[in-house]
Image: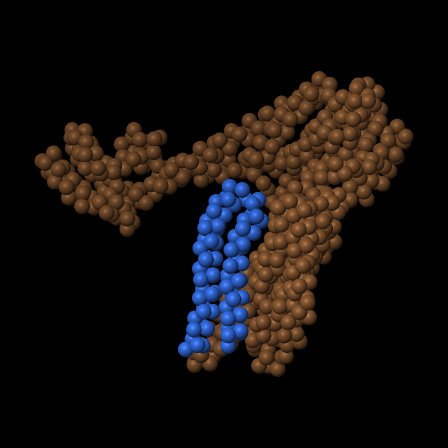
Amino acid sequence: MTAGLIALGAGLAIGLAALATGWAQARIGAAAVGAILEKPESLGTVIILLVIPETLVIFGFTVAILILTTLK
Amino acid sequence: MIVPMAKIRVLGPSSRLSAVIGLLQEVGAVHIESAPGDIRRLQSDIPVIRRHVPDPASQQSRAILESALEKVKKLLLLLPTLPEGRGSDGGPALFPDDSGEEAFQSVNAWLDGLAARAESLVAELKRQRDEQSLFSRYDKVLKVLSPLIEMVRESRDLECTGLILPAQEQFVATLLEEALSRLTDGRFEIVYREVDKDTTAGLLIFPGEKAAEARALLWEKNIGELRLPASVADKPLGEALEIIVRRQAEIPPAIRELEDGLAAISREWREKLLDLRRRLGNRLERIRASASFYETRMVFLLYGWIPTDELPRLEGSIASRFGDAVIVDCLPIEKSEEEGVPVLLRNRPAVRPFEIFTRILPLPRYGTIDPTLLVAVFFPLFYGIIIGDIGYGLLLLAIATVAKRRYGKNPFVSDVTVVFSWAALSSVAWGFAYGELFGDLGERLGLRPLLLRRMGEFRSILLFALGIGAAHVLLGIGLGIYTAFRRGKKREVVSKAAGLGLLVAFAAMIAGVAGGGPPALFLIGLAGSVVSLVVMVWSGGAAAAMEAHNLVNVLSYLRITGIGVASVALAYTANRFVSLVGIPVLGVLAGLALHAVNLAFCILSPTIQALRLHYVEFFENFFLGGGRAYKPFRTIA
């Protein structure tokens, strides 16, 4: 039971963070395509903006690892 | 690196102005300053200094040259490009030896004549192609209707018209037939033939005296009558289709003849026109450059920038051509004008390919740091740490080598392959550190990690990533302090130094709490953090406290671990497919497929993540964009 809850917690930590990242990237990506079409030289800036939300899932991943390794 | 620039002033007698401009273009290293700050100071002392204004004759000749250049450009657009070596480059050049106005006028007149010939051929070619394209749309319908028309062509009292029925409107045919039967007392005939699965063509034959009513009926029932091209619209259907068939046979030879005509002109003149374009462009550049010169009644004056290593060449050329008559002075660059100094990046051949990552950013300002060398060091390092697999690294190296051999002539592809070759080698090296070859395949073959094992030692690799992050961010802050110091921004130096102190103090606090050091370390770290924050706000206001975001930036380096573990987990899963699937062949195939997917991720994801760490976390501490590009005045190749 405890192991199951730990696994659920870790899964939620990374899963919810991944959802949030996906949602943010979808919105940024849609705007980014428009921006690149109008101004191709903005590619560099757009890539930076696009990958910024990935920090969320990285933190989710870290929390998941900590849950799994600390609460074992 | 950013090439050091020298600020120069060229001074000489007005009579030599034109020759000096020619020499500067030949040397091709001087970025001419069109609005130098020094000139204003000089003008306040010597009011007679004014910007050089070309005389009316020069202005007239500029207009003639511009008109000729436009005509040449237009002609080059009209004439087809021939395979290399097919053009004729014999005979005299089109650029006149005599640089007088009359000579250029006659070149202009000759260009007009050639343009008229080429334009008429191009216009006729376009007309023929348009007609061919228009007629080609009738191909399918023609093939279906022609035999039917043959059957009715002899009947003078009958009229016929073509119909087009889309598949979804076939039901209208029955309604039409009923209505036509009432209109003509049954004296009509419709023959249908399928054109394709979406369209049916029909030929409607009816008495000539009922033509108007029959057409009105078609319109009323919304049935598409076959619309013929405008050129044959007034002809009876049979005759029109005959003309179309005949023209379809005549057009291709006519097109070939016109294309041959254009190719002949291109063969004879294209090379010469290209040469003329280059020479006219160079002459115009010289005239335009003269507008950036200043002069008094007797002397001319020019300000500009030149890479310091090119300065001796310029001085030598000027001395050998003009002796002491023209002087090149090297002037000190003042702090206030440093940001306006043109920027030229020059990196060693091994580092230059990494400019593909820095070129998508704005040009760095003069006096700051060109990050290309840093990217060349850290990009392959981060990439290798993320992939960390001997097998994937070797495969990537093979892909990069093949791509370079096949498409290496393209400079961009060549740079990309060099970058990924370094990244692949780094992946192999880190593969040994982690003991990974296609995931745990190496371990099964007896390979042991030299540094740590990624699957399992999660806390170690998290701390490892944080350590790399802290080192990278600290280096960035250090470079930021250096840049601010070089630019004379004292407060920024203090603010960034406080940011660096905050990072170190925070690390001490964590070490104190986590038990990595004596308990007093926590208190020291806490005190250090408070002091750093106060200094930060004092030196740069509340906004300077944003420097504290470097703490979050360090955490962002955890992505190195995240992406790496995801990649190795996929490789482990692929290796377990054989035992999971049960059927060895199927398991091996599925495993190989997953390894291939992982390899594709390996190319894309670590690249983006490693670049992001550079662009966002690293560069923001020291990189200052907005540099002015170095554009030397040189001959057009």
Q: Colour of chain A?
A: blue
Q: Is residue B113 above or below residue B490?
A: above
Asked whether residue B124 appears in the rendered view, the answer is yes
Q: Is residue B376 above or below residue A33?
A: below
The image position of residue B127, as x and y in percent, is 44, 33
Say whether residue B77 is left or right of residue B107: left
In the image, B582 versus B167, the foreground residue is B582
In the image, A5 versus B217, the foreground residue is A5
Say whether residue B92 is left or right of residue B155: right
The image position of residue B93, as x and y in percent, is 70, 32
In the image, B539 versus B636, the foreground residue is B539
Q: Is residue B451 above or below residue B88?
A: below
For the point 65% across and 65% down, the residue is B522
> Judging from the image, what is the letter of the chain drawn in brown?
B
Pick out the residue farthest to the right: B324
For the point 66% across and 51% down, the residue is B534
